[in-house]
Image: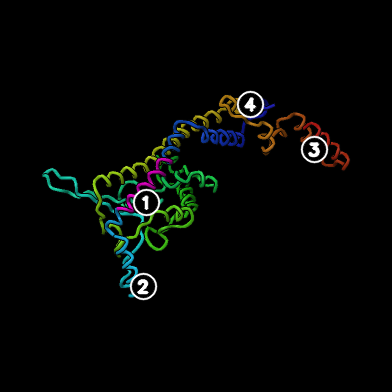
C-alpha cells in the first residue's frame, strides 16, 4: 500500500523526528562519554567543594564568623560583614618567575550552576549556559525545551531561533536575570543546585577584592574540578555533532524520496520500526487521495450536489467498508 503513497513534507517531518529521536537514544561511544563526564563532574563537584570549604574556613574561621554575627545582631548594619558566597578567588605563591621571584597565581572558581569555566569572573555566558543545559538535559527535554541548541548552533552567530531556545532553557532552569543582586542565586532548579555550595566569608565587597590563600596542590585540584566541568560541555558538543552529521544525511535522503515506502525501507534498514498505519492515520490526507476507490467516491460526492440523505448514508457506508 505504501508504494502508492507519495512522500510529502508532513511524512518527511515524521520520519525525520522519529529517526532523530532514535539517534539521540542510541548508546554510542559519544553518548556514553558525555554521560560519564557528567558522573565524573558530580563526584568532583562534591569533593572539590569540600576542599574549598576547608580553605575558606582557614581564612575565615567559624568562630570569627559567629562572633561577627553576634555583633551584627547587637549593633546592626555597621557590623553586617558576613555573607555567603559560592565563588572564590583562590591564590597560591609557590611558583617563581623567570628571575626566581615568587609570583602569585590566582583564578576565579565558581561552584554555581552558571559559574564560569575559564577562571574569568567576566567570561562570556554561552559556555556557562551550555554546561547548565547539558547537565540538566533530561529535565529540560521533559519541559519541552531544546537543551542541545547551543551545541547545534555552535558554528552560528546569535540568531532569533537560537536566542529563543536558550532563553526558554534558562527560564526553565530558573536562571537569574541579573549578574548580581538579591536574585543572583536564581530560582527553581538553579537555586536548588546552588544552595549546596555556599560558604561564609567575611567582607562587604565582591569576591574579586579578596584572594583566599591556598597551597599549590589545592589550587591544582581546583583546576582539575573546573576541567571536569568543561569536559561535560566538550563531550556534549561531540555527541550532538555526531547526531547532527547523521541528521544532515537523513534530511538529504528524505528530500529525495518520492514514496512513503522508501522512508519505511530506510527506517527498517536502520533497525527502526515505523507503523505505516499510524503514519497514514495521522496524516492530513492519507489514503483518501491515493487510494483509487476512495478518490473516486470523494470525487463523486463532490460532483453530486443533490444527493438524498439515503444516498449520502450509502456512500458513507461504502467508503467505510473499503477502509
Of labels 4 and 1, earlier in sequence is 1
**Do residues under tags 4 and 1 come within 8 Å of each other at their CB atoms?**
no
The residue identified by callout 4 is 261
Q: CA distance from mark 4 to mark 1?
A: 53 Å
Question: Which numbered disc flags the more N-terminal residue, 4 or 2?
Answer: 2
Camera-side residue of 217 and 168:
217
Verify CB contact (< 8 Å) between mark 1 and mark 3.
no
Task: Measure how far apart labels 1 and 3 are at the Cα level.
Answer: 69 Å
The colour mode here is rainbow
Residue marked by disc 3: 301
Is label 3 in a helix, a strand or a loop?
helix
Q: Choose between 64 and 318: the one closer to the eye.
A: 64
Q: Residue 253's image quarter?
A: top right
- Give the CA separation, mark 4 to mark 2: 77 Å
Q: What residue range appears in magenta?
A: 39-54
Prevailing SS of the magenta stretch: helix
| Number of other residues with Cα within 10 Å of mark 3, as a class: few under 14, some 14 to 19, many 20 or more | some
> Where does label 2 land, which residue?
73
Foreground of the two, 10 or 70: 70
Q: Judging from the image, what secondary structure is the residue with disc 2 in?
A: helix
Amino acid at each position: 500500500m505504501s508504494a502508492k503513497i507519495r512522500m510529502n513534507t508532513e511524512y518527511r517531518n515524521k520520519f525525520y523526528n522519529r529517526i532523530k529521536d532514535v539517534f539521540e537514544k542510541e548508546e554510542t561511544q559519544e553518548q556514553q562519554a558525555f554521560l560519564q563526564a557528567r558522573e565524573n563532574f558530580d563526584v568532583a563537584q562534591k569533593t572539590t567543594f569540600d576542599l574549598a570549604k576547608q580553605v575558606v574556613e582557614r581564612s575565615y574561621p567559624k568562630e570569627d564568623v559567629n562572633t561577627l554575627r553576634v555583633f551584627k545582631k547587637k549593633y546592626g548594619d555597621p557590623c553586617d560583614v558576613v555573607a555567603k558566597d559560592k565563588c572564590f578567588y583562590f591564590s597560591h605563591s609557590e611558583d617563581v618567575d623567570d628571575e626566581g621571584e615568587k609570583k602569585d597565581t590566582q583564578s576565579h572558581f565558581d561552584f554555581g550552576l552558571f559559574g564560569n569555566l575559564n577562571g574569568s569572573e567576566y567570561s562570556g555566558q554561552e559556555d556557562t549556559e551550555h554546561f547548565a543545559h547539558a547537565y540538566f538535559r533530561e529535565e529540560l527535554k521533559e519541559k519541552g525545551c531544546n537543551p542541545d541548541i547551543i551545541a547545534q548552533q555552535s558554528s552560528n552567530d546569535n540568531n532569533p531561533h537560537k536566542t529563543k531556545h536558550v532563553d526558554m532553557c534558562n527560564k526553565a532552569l530558573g536562571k537569574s536575570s541579573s549578574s548580581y543582586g538579591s536574585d543572583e542565586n536564581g530560582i527553581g532548579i538553579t537555586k536548588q543546585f546552588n544552595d549546596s555550595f555556599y560558604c561564609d566569608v567575611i567582607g562587604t565587597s565582591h569576591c574579586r577584592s579578596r584572594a583566599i590563600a591556598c597551597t599549590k596542590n589545592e589550587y591544582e585540584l581546583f583546576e582539575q574540578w573546573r576541567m571536569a566541568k568543561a569536559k561535560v560541555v566538550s563531550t556534549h558538543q561531540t555527541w550532538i555533532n555526531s547526531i547532527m552529521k547523521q541528521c544532515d544525511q537523513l534530511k538529504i535522503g528524505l528530500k529525495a524520496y518520492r514514496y512513503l515506502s522508501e522512508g519505511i525501507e530506510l527506517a527498517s534498514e536502520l533497525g527502526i520500526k515505523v507503523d505505516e498505519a499510524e503514519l497514514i492515520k495521522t496524516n492530513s490526507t492519507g489514503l483518501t487521495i491515493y487510494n483509487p476507490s476512495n478518490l473516486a467516491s470523494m470525487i463523486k460526492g463532490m460532483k453530486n450536489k443533490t444527493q438524498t440523505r439515503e444516498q449520502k448514508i450509502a456512500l458513507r457506508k461504502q467508503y467505510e467498508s473499503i477502509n
